[in-house]
Image (cartoon, rainbow, N blue to C red):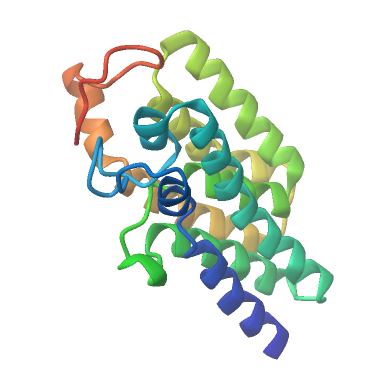
Amino acid sequence: MLIDVLCIFLAYLAGSLSTAVIVCRLFGLPDPREQGSRNPGTTNVLRLGGKKAAAITLAGDCLKGLLPVWLAAALGASPAGLAGSALGAFLGHLYPVFFGFQGGKGVATAFGVLLGLSWPTALAALVTWLTVALITRYSSLSALLATGLSPLYLWWLQAPTVYLVALLIMAILLVWRHRSNIRNLLAGREDKIGGAKTNKS
């Protein structure tokens, strides 16, 4: 139990390291919480600083989800501890204690924790994202569908129930964080990948 609690706490702290803000500071770029879409995530960093800064942000956000789950497994955490660590890292990204609880939408970090919990599920989610992105050119729609289908993939692979519960919570939170994107999608105002930057919400 103590190991589980410690791993969950450390996972939240790791998730609270806002890669987008750190990268923008290192590159001398504007604070992503104040410029562009005001979302500290990969897409906004791409707008503000280009592909290199965005790639580093993406890798960092994935790793801060993956590494805490790996650490929990290495320390012998229970399945509940692993699921809690995954959820803790995700919540840290959404509500980072080090950055005024102003976090991102959680797509890359969710992929990282999913990779740590069940790599086949993460692979299925990635294929879903790529397929939807190629067809629709909407990054937000791709993320929503990939995340929404991930619990189904996890259930089909017969993963522990606590993993499924954690992923369902993450999926609900991710949809909530994308509510402005959903409104824009319904109104036909959402930006497409490689298209014009019209969405500043």
Q: Position of residue 57 (x, y in %)?
A: 52, 43
Looking at this rendering, what residue extends furthest in the front direction? 28
- 99 or 169, which lies in front? 99
Image quadrant holding the N terminus, namely bottom right
Q: Is residue 1 visible?
A: no
Q: Residue at x 49, y 52 (%)?
A: 19
- 132 or 51, which lies in front? 51
Quick check: 2 above or below 184? below
Q: Is residue 177 visible?
A: yes
Q: Is residue 195 left or right of residue 35?
A: right
Q: How many marks?
A: 0
Q: Is residue 94 left or right of residue 60?
A: left
- 7 or 118, which lies in front? 7
Q: Position of residue 126 (x, y in %)?
A: 62, 30
Q: Residue at x 56, y 78 (%)?
A: 9
Q: Position of residue 173 (x, y in %)?
A: 38, 53
Quick check: 180 above or below 130? below
Looking at this rendering, what residue extends furthest in the bottom direction? 2
- 168 or 143, which lies in front? 143
Location of residue 201 by image quarter: top left
Location of residue 83 by image quarter: bottom right
Quick check: 182 above or below 103? above
Q: Residue at x 45, y 63 (%)?
A: 91
Q: Residue at x 35, y 28 (%)?
A: 47
